[in-house]
Amino acid sequence: NEENLGKPIGSDEEQNKNTYVSLIGIEESQRLVNSLTETAVASIDKISDLCDDLKKLALSLAKRMS
């Protein structure tokens, strides 16, 4: 919805802006978010066990609505 997006629905299309959703669809976009988040968390784990806040940030960004 417009509140979650923080802008009018369809405004990117009206301004001829490409988005991942318009290019590859919502399901594939979500799959990509999940895959990249898993990669990020795995990479953080390799660096240090002291990076829990960074892992939490990556996971929260993947779940955010806007």
Image (cartoon, rainbow, N blue to C red):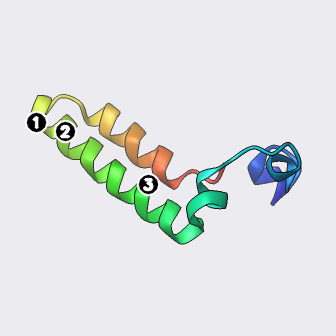
Q: Which residue is mark 1?
A: 46
Disc 2 packing (10 Å; few <14; some 14–19; many ≥20): few
Disc 2 to disc 3, C-alpha distance: 15 Å
13 or 42: nearer the viewer: 13
Q: How many marks?
A: 3
Left or right? Give the position of 39 relative to 10: left
Tell me the CA gap for discs 2 and 1.
Answer: 5 Å
Note whether residue 11 is visible.
Answer: yes
- The answer to whether the residue labelled 3 contacts the one labelled 1, judged by CB atoms less than 8 Å apart, is no
Q: Give the residue type that dot 3 points to.
A: Val
Q: Nearer the viewer, mark 3 or mark 1?
A: 3
Q: Amino acid at mark 2?
A: Ser
Q: Nearer the viewer, residue 62 or 10?
A: 10
**25 versus 12 height, above or below:** below
What x and y, as percent, mark residue 61?
Answer: 49, 44
Where residue 3 appears, as percent x and y from the top left, is: 82, 51
Whether residue 48 is visible to the viewer of this picture, yes or no, is no
Q: Residue at x 35, y 49 (%)?
A: 37
Rounded to the nearest whole Å, what is the CA distance between mark 3 and mark 1? 20 Å
Q: Residue at x 31, y 40 (%)?
A: 55
Marks 2 and 1: CB-CB under 8 Å? yes
The label shown at residue 33 is: 3
Mark closer to the chain start, 2 or 3: 3
Q: Which residue is mark 2?
A: 43
Residue 1 rendering spot, x and y as whole percentages = 80, 61
Q: Is residue 24 left or right of residue 60?
A: right
Residue at horizontal 86%, vertical 42%?
15
